[in-house]
Amino acid sequence: MPRLFGLLFALASLSSASASQTQQVLFPGETGETLQASLRAAYKPTSGQLPSSSAGKDLMMYPIWTVDEGGGIGVQDVYTGWFVAFQNDPPGNANQEVFNNGAGNGLNQEHVWPRSRLNGSSSATSERDLHHLFPSRVDVNSDRGSLPFADIDDALTTRWYADGVETGTAPTSDRDAYSELRTGVAFEPRESVKGDVARAMFYVATMYPSEADLSWFASQERPLYEWHNADRVDAAEFDRTVAIASSQGGTNRENPFVLDSTLVRRAFFPGTIIDAEAGAPNELAIQQHGPNPFRAATRLVLDVSAPTPVHADLLDARGRTVSVLYNGLAPAGPLELALEGHFLAPGVYSVRVVAGEAVLTRRLVRAR
């Protein structure tokens, strides 16, 4: 559920539990490099908070990426969906078990941002950060190598990968389930994980600008942004980022791009509005439904045309935050905010609402 602070009573229900968990507005009003710096300061783990390279591989396989398939527990390759069961339940050495038990298609650790594009070593923070380490079939991992991500024209695809299959012939059905390789040029993940990949890439670019090869990343930014918009955060991705955070320092160690769907645009494409991006409502209004000036209480109603990440706070006359009123996914339709005056000293206040692309304010006066 959205967090409730101080003076807010949100009377409208949320559209879904997973959406309310995953969507909030971080650092409202900030954009570009300023926002990236704020995200780094708040969310980047220290080297001492990260597991060792070997421990991280085991944690990645169990429990972070562990799934239950047909009553057996194991791991799915992010690029193909190929499932490998653990040899033991629970596994004794998770990373080794899914490598050995893959019947020719074992799994290993894929650096979504390739190690060769990071200025570090196996002990460097950027290379051990679990937010961009995904399980992958060994052969697919090898074929992708350090190639950039891109949308590949099917006519130019040289290899297709799905489940345990690798073929040079274009599939006749369900092509969205296949990852694609254009040998020596680019790699394209299957459609259902493109957003996961994109958010991992933007995370590395933000957290490790001095280690990551940003010139290599530059040509990928726009397609990755489109992947982020097309493949939204689901409950599984949200659960993974929370699990990773608990292994990398706990509080504020999630991938923030998973928590806030507006961050990619605000941090890398400030001023850009893409119709596909959730959180850019067609209509937004805030109305006064109670007295102003007020003493005991007053009401404001926020109205959005589509489910939208909303951050609302109450500011004093000097622009300082008195209370965070709302931080979560607001449902389509009216959302009522009830402010109780006995918490406030007499004076001038304002409610600031950041909702998707829009920022609205409403001046309020607490009477004596």
Image: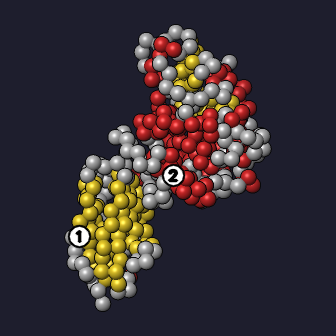
Q: Position of residue 162 (x, y in %)?
A: 53, 20
Taking 360 as reference, is 272 above or below it? above
Query: Pointer 1: residues within 10 angstroms few (<14), some, or many (20+)?
Result: some
Which x, y percent locates residue 332?
Answer: 28, 52
Q: Which residue corresponds to mark 1?
A: 288
Q: Distance of mark 1 from mark 2, alpha carbons? A: 33 Å
Which quadrant of the rendered structure holds the C terminus?
A: bottom left
Q: Which mark is residue 32?
A: 2
Q: Which amino acid is tagged 1?
A: Gln
Q: Residue 283, position in %: x, y?
A: 26, 52
Q: Which residue is more in the foreground, 358 or 102?
A: 358
Q: What amino acid does circle 2 point to?
A: Gly
13 and 296: which is toward the camera: 296
Q: Secondary structure at mark 1?
A: strand
Q: Secondary structure at mark 2?
A: helix
Q: Residue furthest bottom?
A: 368
Q: Residue at x 27, y 48 (%)?
A: 282
Q: Is residue 130 above or below residue 144?
A: below
Disc 1 versus disc 2: nearer the observer: 2
Left or right of residue 112, residue 22 in this image = left
